[in-house]
Image: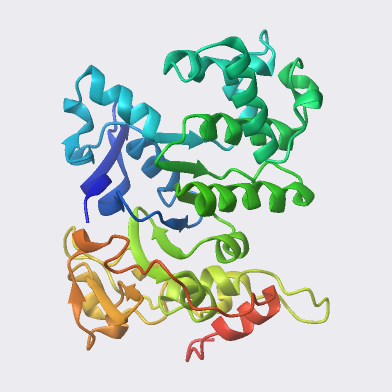
Amino acid sequence: MAALLEAQDVTKVFSGGLLKRERVIALRDFSFTVPEEQPIFTAIVGESGSGKTTLARLLLGLTTPTTGDVRYRGISLKQLNREQRRAFLRDVQAIFQDPFEVYNPFYKVDHVLELPIRMFHLAKSAQEMRNRIEEALITVGLRPEETLGRYPHQLSGGQRQRVMIARALLLRPKVIIADEPVSMVDASLRATILSSLQQLHREYGISILYITHDLATAYQVANDVLVLYRGTVVEAGDAGLIIREPEHPYTRLLVSSVPLPDPDRQWLGERALGQPVSGLMPRGTAFCVFYDRCPYAMPICVEQTPPLFRTGDRRVVACYLYRDSPTIDRRNLAAGGVFTNGRTEVSPPSYSALKREAQPDSPHA
């Protein structure tokens, strides 16, 4: 299957400081493929600092990788000619966390919708432009008569975010990279925005990369989940399997750290897994990134980086607890490869159920 967008062994290192040069590895040897023909809906989850936003910026061409390459239809983003870059800008659209930063406060919201139509010559007349804009707004649940003609500050955060989804829809892109699109929106509007993304995926065949720290919404909308920790993929596969039955200790921690809605039950938080193993120190640059927080850490965890172990047809885990399972090349982490386009049909669990199912029996608890 041809690749629309592909990250190949991408590493991004940030350096800072004048006298003491500090290096932060935001993303480490990351590979992933968005297929051309089969649309995917994949959630990329992890705590703050795990590399999610860096990944989004790399895939959008806003940041250059330190090593590795990001390719569009097999061509490096650095080598795209003018025509190819124009096609890339149309096929790969973004929805950012704070929609207000995208708007020019001196222009009405009409401007942000009209601009892509003019740039890509999508309408032959002003009336056709108007019709396209109104159709896109209605698709995302907005009333044109209540939206057009207003300035950004006159709309709510949810309305501004849905206008940005409508803007992306106008271009009929192949993939939308949504970076925390509902984190700054009221809870009552999150379902509406996520439903709009699902609709774009189902009805228009648009692939969605949904970047979030919220496991509940990732479970509700995504077919697949990719879990990042310190810039490294630690678990990936079917959303239902991973969130209901997490295998990597870090994924278990993500699920079990959600507070239970029970005032009589103590929230364990970071202690949910048990005490981390002490006395282990890496001997070089190859080691498990979670070793210093893991109660199951072994000497091998600080001697070499764990590969991706295939623990099922729809899941891979980077943990030596599963070292008896077969391994796969990280470069095969792609929809249609590790991932499946369908998902196990199960009823969405509550937060309480998620925590109970993910709670490990740790000897260190």
Q: Which residue shows up at 70% across the image and 70% down it?
A: 259
- The answer, for residue 112, to whether it is visible in the render is no
**Protein image colouring:** rainbow
Q: Which residue shows up at 32% across the image and 30% down it?
A: 88
Most foreground residue, 247 or 71: 71
Residue 215: percent from left, percent from top:
57, 63
Residue 105: percent from left, percent from top:
67, 13
The total number of labels drawn is 0
98 left or right of 323?
right
Residue 338: percent from left, percent from top:
29, 69
Most foreground residue, 352 or 361: 352
Q: Hey, which quadrant is residue 119 in on the image?
A: top left
Q: Hey, which quadrant is residue 328 in on the image?
A: bottom left
Residue 182: percent from left, percent from top:
64, 46
Q: Which residue shows up at 75% across the image and 15% down it?
A: 149
**Residue 50, above or below 121:** below
Q: Which residue shows up at 58% across the image and 38% down it?
A: 97
- The answer, for residue 292, to whether it is visible in the render is yes
**Residue 291, above or below 18:** below
**Residue 153, above or below 295:** above
Question: Split into 4 quadrants, where in the image is the N terminus?
Answer: bottom left
Question: Split into 4 quadrants, where in the image is the C terminus?
Answer: bottom right
Most foreground residue, 262 or 17: 262
